[in-house]
Amino acid sequence: YYILQQQLEMDMKITLDPQNISNTAVLKQQNYETRLPLITKKKSASMCSQKIGKGHTVSNLWGLPASHHMGSPLPLLEEDRTKGILSLTELRLIPPAAKITLQTPPVVSKAAPFHEFHKQHKKSAEAIYGKYSSSKGNIVPLPSSSSMVSARKSKLARTYPAQQLESDLQIPSQTQDLCFDCDIAFYHGTIDQKAPGFLAFKQHYCLSWKSIVFFLEHTEKLLKDYAVPLATINCKKLAEVASDFELNENPTKSDILSVIKNQSTVEKILNRPGQRYKGQGGTEMAATKIQTTWRCYQARKAYVHFRQQQWASGVIAISWLLHNHMARVKKTLKESRQRHLENFYIRAKHLAANWNRIRTSRRTIIHIPSLGYSQCIREHIPGLALQQNMQMGRLCDILDANVDVIYICPLHLSEELLQYYNKLLGLQAAVRSGKPEDMGDLQDRFKILTPEAINSFPKHHMCLATQLKYSPKTIKRIKILIQSKDAYIIGGVPHKDDLAVADMLNVPILGSVPEVAHLYSTKSGSKRIFTSACVPTPPGESDIYNNEQMISALSQLILDNMEVRRWLFKVNDESGGNGTAYCDIILHLKCYHWVQKECQRYSPEIWSKKWAHEPALVKISQELPGLLAQHVQPVNEKRFPTWEKFLQTFLSQGGVIEAFPLSENVTNLTVDMLIEPTGKIKIVSSGDQLHADGPLRSSGTTIPQCSVDPAVLNSLCLKIGETCKSKGVLGYFSVDFVTFIHPQTMEQQVWATDLDLCYSDQLALTQLMLYMTDGNLDCRSSRFEVSLGSNKMKSQRIQHEETKTPSPVSNRCAVASSQLRHSSLSVIYYNVLLQMCKARGVGFDLQKKQGTVFILYEDQQRYRLGMITIGEDLQGVLMTFARNLFIIHQEISAPNMQGETNFKMAIQDIEAILGITAENKLKLEEEQPSKADALKE
């Protein structure tokens, strides 16, 4: 009985859902077979009298025949008999093994013609749909047992022959065709439930009508909600789509649109803005939407306000934390810098007290060629690391036998460059003896160290002192090298981190305090030094910080110096001519002739009064802004392409305005000085400037200077040195002068123009020049002398000098430059360049102590180098220097690729100097006979 019950339950499932895949699989896998009772045809008069029912529904198709229960031991009620065989079997009124025979079927298959449906034949929607309501959640009732049996017979058509099923149930072919081809129309969301097509569709899909009704409910609701006037449903597609949905899964809008024939039209209506509020419940929906939107707006507004407050509180909290942290860091940094400064003064006093002993005993000099300019200036220095490495001549301090040198290099040098400097510095003994075979190895006397922090901060534009400060490995190595030795630091442009490095190494600095150096290295600061020293300076005005002040000062300067044609504008913190601009104002000033007439109208006494200048000042002041905007020419056009950009920097940093010399033949010279810790002032180098990059930028020097009387120059330099000493300046510094012949008085004028409180490139070149010649530069007499033919080693220590036979002495001159550049140099290696120069006769003679020496800076880009040419006289050394430049340019350049270089301008400047030198020689030769005649008389 249990097995039969399971089989009946499976039959019921298959009957209810014949399209289910799992039910089909059961039939295939288990060879499922439902055994129907054997039906035998018997003629009975009672059957003839039965009424033949036509249609698709028979209530007692599976009723028990009367012949069976006539002799049944169990009494059967009429009510039980009408429920069917399945019900009697479940009630155990019929044994499972009983043979059941059916009489002639009460339903005869016959084509059923369609007739017009009149009003009296129409049935209610409840009879067709059954009782359901989407709003109340009711579900369509299950079909009757006769419908299930019919569905089961249609499912078993694969098992039983078609002839056997024809006698049970047959659907007319016309009805099938009609159902498959018909469409259902929704007018304003309502379907005509009594239309023939709909009824036929319902009859054909009666087995899956439950899912179809469920789908139609949602379709009808959607169309009514959006007030769709007409929608046509494809019946066949509807049946396919509806069968895929379970009762607990609602169809989506896209699913509903997929069964609509006029899908595009309906979709446009559904997507029309505001269409939802035109359908059923639209007013309520609109009110709900308005309320929802308003509440959302209020909630969003409140949320945004809350988030803003939350963000603001977070910003305030973070800002306060950062402020406190920054305050603590600033306080700590201020305390550490104050401690560094105090230690600097303590060590400076110790250095001053022991200087006479230290300078003559074994010591180590730590050279840090750092450019400690402000951050904004360092950012605009192209190739900052290369600029800091142009003083390789500092290594030549090992000329003193008691000195060891530690050179901090801002670049990684290759083995080729290190080998070059090892050989170059090893020439010391060979230079003194004049024999190349005496060349030694002095690698233990100097060390070239590169801070590891240069790799950590490649784009931060840090000066070398800062990089060394953040290089603990290099600091540790320096400590080992200077252990138990006297040592001191010689820096470059002073920076606060120089004090920090000195504090870490516990060594003194031979230099000024950074604040003092920066104050008096500016253009305005140098003017104050020169004014205090009472040395002549160009007419000008300093400490200019606004446009009105600049126009007013320049107008007054023009009136006071009518003969000055060119005026210079110099930015305070710039160096090397980068922050300089010039303008030939008189050539472009339209009111200049009117001002001259005004000057002639008054006597000199009246013209000197301010009221006489007022009309001219007004006119000049009105004309100057436009004139300057059109005719000012910055020296560094890459940095300052326009007057506006230059003026912005000029006024932000401050600057000076000064007159350019009145003569066309102007010579600039640089003097390097040293204020020792004991206060002694020395002149250590002097030279006339070369200008390979324009008349206002120095690119080289001729050593010693020969343009100014040494006595006059020494007097000016000592005055400036005494003033610097009184201001707290210590160590190396350089002073720039300009000299010319005044066109009216025909007397030589010397003006002090600039002051740099740092170790200069000229001094580094001078050190290399002295190292390669073992000579002596006497700046008081402007003589450079070398001894020839001596095989004895000379001691550099004064206290150990012995009386010996004087060696022949010869005068020498040198032309040196550290700013030579040529873009084609990067295409060849240094060893190839040196071989080419050697083949063309460019080299150095150790016996004659004259020739050419190169200074190599780096081997990555290789477009810059330094060169020193030493000879017997100025004209000869200038010609040799120019010839060397020509040879190098010819060797490395192709005719159609000259490259970017300053070689040509350097040669032109040298040619101009040679022309002036020739003229001076002729004048001197003319003056000497006249003097001799005067003496005879």
Image: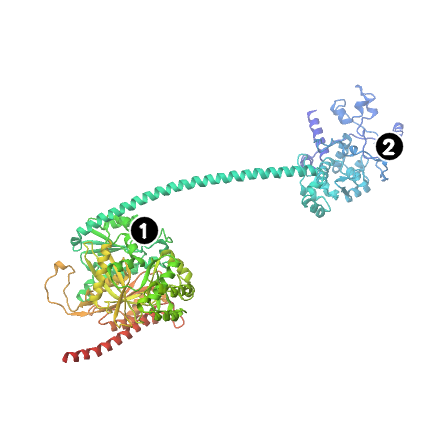
Give the position of the N terminus as an image quadrant. Answer: top right
- Number of callouts: 2
Q: Disc 2 residue type?
A: Ile
Q: Nearer the viewer, mark 2 or mark 1?
A: 1
Q: Disc 1 residue type?
A: Thr
The front one of 228 and 307 is 307
Residue 242: x and y, percent?
A: 70, 39
| Residue occupying image coordinates x 38% and y 54% | 459
Residue 856: x and y, percent?
A: 30, 62
Q: Which mark is residue 118?
A: none
Label 2 residue SS: loop
Label 1 residue SS: helix
Residue 155: x and y, percent?
A: 74, 36
| Residue occupying image coordinates x 64% and y 39% | 290
Residue on which disc 2 sits = 52
Q: Pointer 2: residues within 10 angstroms few (<14), some, or many (20+)?
A: few
In this rendering, the answer to whether 344 lies above or below 62 is below
Give the mark nearest the N terminus, 2 or 1: 2
Q: Is residue 292 left or right of residue 167?
A: left
Q: CA distance from mark 2 to mark 1?
A: 115 Å
Q: Quadrant of residue 561?
A: bottom left
In this rendering, the answer to whether 652 lies above or below 933 is above
Residue 6: x and y, percent?
A: 69, 28
Question: Does residue 212 appear anywhere in the picture?
Answer: yes
Q: Is residue 511 left or right of residue 330?
A: left
| Residue occupying image coordinates x 59% and y 38% | 296
Q: Which mark is residue 466?
A: 1
Give the position of the C terminus as an image quadrant. Answer: bottom left
Name the colouring of the figure: rainbow
In this rendering, the answer to whether 389 lies above or below 915 is above
Q: Quadrant of residue 779?
A: bottom left
